[in-house]
Image: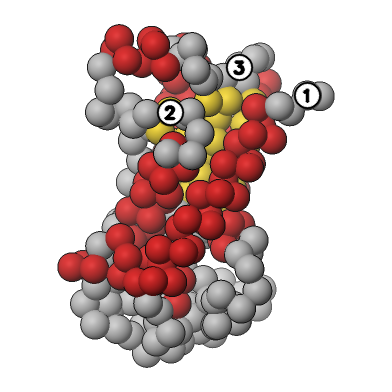
């Protein structure tokens, strides 16, 4: 049940079927020279929609903005700070809790370390404040790691490469503008670089070349199955 498409009566009726909601988080962020800035958000929202076809679950509208540390100098990236992201997590989930939701699946299409840490930190605080709540926090990369061996050809593929290009070729082929060269960032370990573009000029973490629409269709179907399993575990979780 997509919150933006149902009426208040349908919402009330839906609470008799489920108290679980998926809250998708994304970003407005560069994805190479060939994928749209909204790739993360498009992917995670379509995944949530696909999952809602497998089991009763509410799907909140996506949070479009994320914390983009490594890509903030690339053209088109629009980020928010950790405090803003934490506040959005807490405000949105608290409001949903007030509407009767109890199981929260916070899944992000953007998998940056500081971004995910902010969501996790906010969720951890909410488990103390909302006494009947349960939270699961994960990123798309967590699901990609569960895909069958051999499906993704590019080792270490993570951003605007084989996986995301395949997904966008399936979900929004009209938004894919050719391709980009294979690339991996070369940031130094332990040292924070001021000129991030010097260490990651093309904004690709992987290789778009092996991407196909057929592979993208299979990936999102498998991701939805895994996410559905995680939701079932969350709904049955007892401490």
**Vertical position of residue 218 compared to residue 227: above or below:** below
Question: Tags 2 and 3 in contact by the CB under 8 Å rule?
Answer: no
Quadrant showing the C terminus: top right
Residue 90 badge: none
Please state the horizontal and vertical placement of residue 59, each as a whole percent of the image: 40, 33
Quadrant showing the N terminus: top left
| Residue matched to label 2 | 58
Q: Spot the residue most to the bottom.
A: 181
In terms of depth relative to the viewer, which is nearer, 59 or 129? 59
Please state the horizontal and vertical placement of residue 220, each as a whole percent of the image: 45, 58
**Vertical position of residue 237 compared to residue 186: above or below:** above
Q: Residue at position x 34%, y 31% from top?
A: 2
Q: Residue at position x 33%, y 46% from top?
A: 64
Q: Is 151 situated left or right of 180 in this image?
A: right
In terms of depth relative to the viewer, which is nearer, 72 or 209? 209
Please state the horizontal and vertical placement of residue 78, each as a whole percent of the image: 30, 56
| Residue matched to label 3 | 130
Question: Tags 2 and 1 in contact by the CB under 8 Å rule?
Answer: no
State the CA–CA distance, disc 2 to disc 1.
21 Å
Please state the horizontal and vertical placement of residue 87, each as a whole percent of the image: 46, 32
Residue 36 seen in the current view = yes
Q: Is 142 situated left or right of 78 in this image?
A: right
| Residue matched to label 1 | 238
If you read the primary sequence from the N terminus, does the residue marked by circle 1 or circle 3 appear first?
Answer: 3
If you read the primary sequence from the N terminus, does the residue marked by circle 2 or circle 3 appear first?
Answer: 2
């Amino acid at each position: 049940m997509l919150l933006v498409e149902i009426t208040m009566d349908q919402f009330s009726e839906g609470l008799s079927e489920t108290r679980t909601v998926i809250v998708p988080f994304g970003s407005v962020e560069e994805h190479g020279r060939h994928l749209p800035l909204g790739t993360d958000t498009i992917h995670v929202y379509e995944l949530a929609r696909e999952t809602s076809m497998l089991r009763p679950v509410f799907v909140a509208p996506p949070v479009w903005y994320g914390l983009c540390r490594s890509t903030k100098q690339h053209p088109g990236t629009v980020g928010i700070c950790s405090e803003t992201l934490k506040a959005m997590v807490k405000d949105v989930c608290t409001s949903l809790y007030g509407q009767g939701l109890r199981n929260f699946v916070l899944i992000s299409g953007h998998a940056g370390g500081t971004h995910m840490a902010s969501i996790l930190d906010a969720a951890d605080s909410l488990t103390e404040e909302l006494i009947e709540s349960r939270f699961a926090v994960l990123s798309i990369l967590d699901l990609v790691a569960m895909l069958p061996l051999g499906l993704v050809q590019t080792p270490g593929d993570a951003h605007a490469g084989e996986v995301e290009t395949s997904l966008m070729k399936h979900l929004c082929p009209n938004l894919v503008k050719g391709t980009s060269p294979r690339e991996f960032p070369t940031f130094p370990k332990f040292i924070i670089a001021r000129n991030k573009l010097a260490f990651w000029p093309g904004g690709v973490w992987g290789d778009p070349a092996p991407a196909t629409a057929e592979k993208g269709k299979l990936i999102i179907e498998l991701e939805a199955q895994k996410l559905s399993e995680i939701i079932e575990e969350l709904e049955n979780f007892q401490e």
